[in-house]
Amino acid sequence: MFKYNVCFLKSNDRILMLNREKPPIMGVWNGVGGKNEAGETADEGAIREVFEETGIKVDKYYSKGVITWDKNDGEKDGLYVYLFEVDATLGNEPIQKTREGILNWKQVDWIMNPNNLGIAEMVIQYLPVLLEKENDYLFEYKDGIVKLIG
């Protein structure tokens, strides 16, 4: 099991994004998330992190992925990525300042725009797959590219 998760909440054509105020990826838009606690499954950690960082209760994810990569020592590391569908009215909520950074609902087209340099580097590579259909996916990250492998 890997330690970290990143979660995206979708409301109609908007996704809740966090512009982080501290490392890692400070100043970049990404999903919410963090570290799974001892004894938690990845799903439990994701649900808890979403609530802690947004105040929104989610239960079942729409789609989920695991991104793996090789560490320098030859071991595998990875990250769990989640997409949760939430109430249609939530996507109209105003910008919110939190202890983690700024939460804001962004249009999917804005996130996926190739000219948008403010999005975490892997997001535009795996998010379209998570949005495509309900499923569990496996990705591999190598040489700056996220590749769908299953």
Image (cartoon, rainbow, N blue to C red):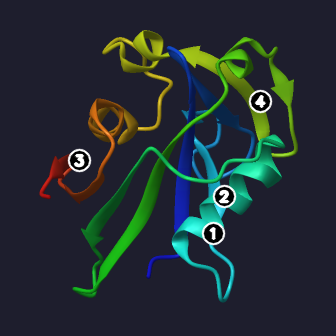
**Which residue position is annotated with label 1?**
44
Q: Quadrant of the N terminus?
A: bottom left
Observer able to see residue 10:
yes
**CB atoms of marks 2 and 3 within 8 Å:** no
**Which residue position is annotated with label 3?**
144
Q: Nearer the viewer, mark 2 or mark 3?
A: 2
Query: How far is the residue under mark 3 from the one under mark 1?
Result: 29 Å
Q: Nearer the viewer, mark 3 or mark 1?
A: 1
Tell which circle, 2 or 4, labels the residue nearer the N-terminal end.
Answer: 2
**Which residue position is annotated with label 2?**
47
* Residue at the image point whose x is 27% and y is 87% from the top: 73
Q: Nearer the viewer, mark 3 or mark 4?
A: 4
Q: Secondary structure at mark 2?
A: helix
**Amino acid type of the residue that numbered disc 2 sits on in the rendered structure:** Ile
Q: Nearer the viewer, mark 2 or mark 4?
A: 2
In the picture, the disc for residue 102 is: 4
**Amino acid type of the residue that numbered disc 4 sits on in the rendered structure:** Ile
Badge 3: few (under 14), some or many (20 or more) residues near its Cα, within 10 Å? few
**Amino acid type of the residue that numbered disc 3 sits on in the rendered structure:** Gly
